[in-house]
Amino acid sequence: MSISDKDSTDKDITDQNSTDSDTLININHLSSAYGDRQVLNDINLSVEQGEILVIMGGSGSGKSTLLRNMLGLMQPSSGEILFEGKNICHVNKSEMLKLRRKMGVAFQGGALLSSLSVGDNIKLPLRQHTDLDENTINIMARLKLELMSLANFEDLMPSELSGGMLKRAGLARAVIMDPKILFFDEPSAGLDPVTSVELDQLILQLRTAMNMTIVVVTHELESAFTIADRIAVLFDGELVTTGTVDEIKNCTDERVINLINRTPREMKIDADKYLSRLTKGAS
Amino acid sequence: MFAQIEKLGAHTIQIFEEFGRLLMFLGQVIFSVFSRPFGFRDLVKQIAFIGARSMPIILLSGLFTGMVLALQFYDVLARFGSVDLMGSAVSLSLIQELGPVMTALMIIARVGSATCAEIAIMRSEQQFDALTCMAISPFRYVMVPRLLAAIISIPLLTAIFNLIGIVGGYIVGVFIKDLSGTAYMQTIIDTITWSDLRMSIVKSFLFAIIIIWISMGKGFFVHLEKGVSGAEAVGRVTTKAVVASAITMLFADYIASSFLI
């Protein structure tokens, strides 16, 4: 790319910076698909500085796909995602790397590297991206581990941790570089109620302690209502509504009411037809 | 009939697609060799895994291969009254062919399968996504140390296999078949030329790249396995990686031999 090309790209990026200064992420008309299967349809959503936004929805509603798009792990079929005004769908590789350093991601199962100890996993981003000496790296890692109540587990391997500990270790690694925004995929999934509540408290403490913007993807209602400043509800790849916890609780949309009341979808099973098919198969 | 042709066509397209995907994967790994920072610690760790920890099986298999070769050659050479040439026969067979091939097969069994399974599990557990999100290239961090470690370790293991095989031949020839030890060694020195050694070195480099490339690539694309997921997919790609590595290695052996002999 020539210098003039680069200048024009920078200008384009600056032009896109015209969004509200309190908005960290702006998603405009985002659609995404796996092959022929459309998963997200025309999503418009914003993430404000310092807020905890919970993306909520049932299984297959598209929340994880939305998260993968926001992380730049997946290219949308149309639309744009502006992070600090920069369209992450079209930035070059080095620009994307810079943006990634402002993001922290805690994956559902922790996604710790199985060949490294918990401590080495947490130190990995510091070792890769900074020139800090080993002593400082050790201190920083220990601080984050203490914050996650994992101070005595630094030398253990990921396979020796429980599900909740893996999530907390993943969270420690996600915040080790003090990112501007933290993405957390299904913090409560697979955890007992007590550990789940502990993790919710941890997310709230993190926001207070580190003044971080947090995006949480979950299908757990209690967890969402505890931690969220705003909730975005997805249903079958469409954004049904966004609002505060009270607004969501009082929402009149049937799909949101069904989600809150845990009403199962109507199963269209014709018992007679099913039985006749079964007997046909047997004969 | 048409259905069978259609099936064959679909299968052929699938093979070409997979080969193309693996080639692009190799290109990305080679491109990442030149990116920074270089993971020296990871390289040493992988050399220890591929090289040092493979030593016992290489020593054992090399010794027994050399011993069996000596027994076989003694029987054949005795019919022609040329048992004095046993040193040459054993060493040439080992250096030109059996050393690189047997070492490669041992490495496929020990390292290729483990590498493929490890990478497939990393993929399934979103560890590559995690690396990407940490602005760390999975190719540079995970693949490059393995590729370089294989390129460094496998030729060295092949050389050790050749040496220990010659020692095995010596044990059988001198201590069991009462041949002259000096004659055994002298015929080796007289026969082996630089071109024989070059063939061994070239083949071992080639096999190193093939083994690690296919093992890593198959593991990396575990999510594209049709109809299976999780542990079953990991098991399936590992089996495929071992079979594909062995067949590709033997095919490359034929090509390399036809150019180098």
Image (tube, coloured by chain):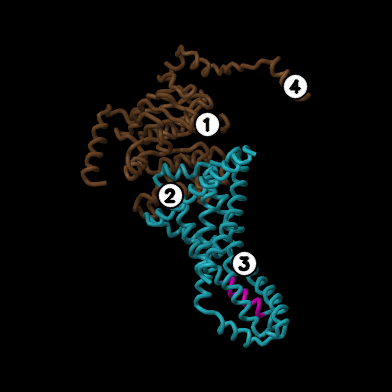
Chain colours: A brown, B cyan
Q: What residue would you read off at disc 3?
A: B56
- Who is closer to the viewer here, B251 or B201? B251
Q: What crowding class fits label 2: few (fewer than 14 Cα within 10 Å), some (14-19), or many (20 or more)?
A: many
Q: Residue at x 27, y 31 (%)?
A: A16
Marks 4/3: CA distance? 61 Å
Q: What crowding class fits label 1: few (fewer than 14 Cα within 10 Å), some (14-19), or many (20 or more)?
A: many
* Badge 1 vs badge 4, beta-carbon distance below 8 Å: no
Q: What residue would you read off at disc 1?
A: A188
Residue B110 placement (x, y as % from top left): 60, 58
Image position of B163 with respect to B3: above or below:
below
Q: Which mark is residue A217?
A: none
Marks 1/2: CA distance? 25 Å
Predominant SS of the magenta segment? helix
Q: Helix, strand or loop at disc 3?
A: helix
Marks 3/1: CA distance? 46 Å
Q: Earlier in the sequence, mark 4 or mark 2?
A: 2
Per the rendered image, the range of residues in magenta is B160-170
Q: Residue at x 50, y 47 (%)?
A: A113
Q: Helix, strand or loop at disc 1?
A: loop
Marks 3/2: CA distance? 33 Å
Marks 4/2: CA distance? 60 Å
* Badge 3 vs badge 1, beta-carbon distance below 8 Å: no
Q: Which mark is residue A280?
A: 4
Residue A157 can be seen, yes or no:
no
Dot 1 and dot 4 within a common chain: yes
Which quadrant is home to the C terminus of chain A?
top right
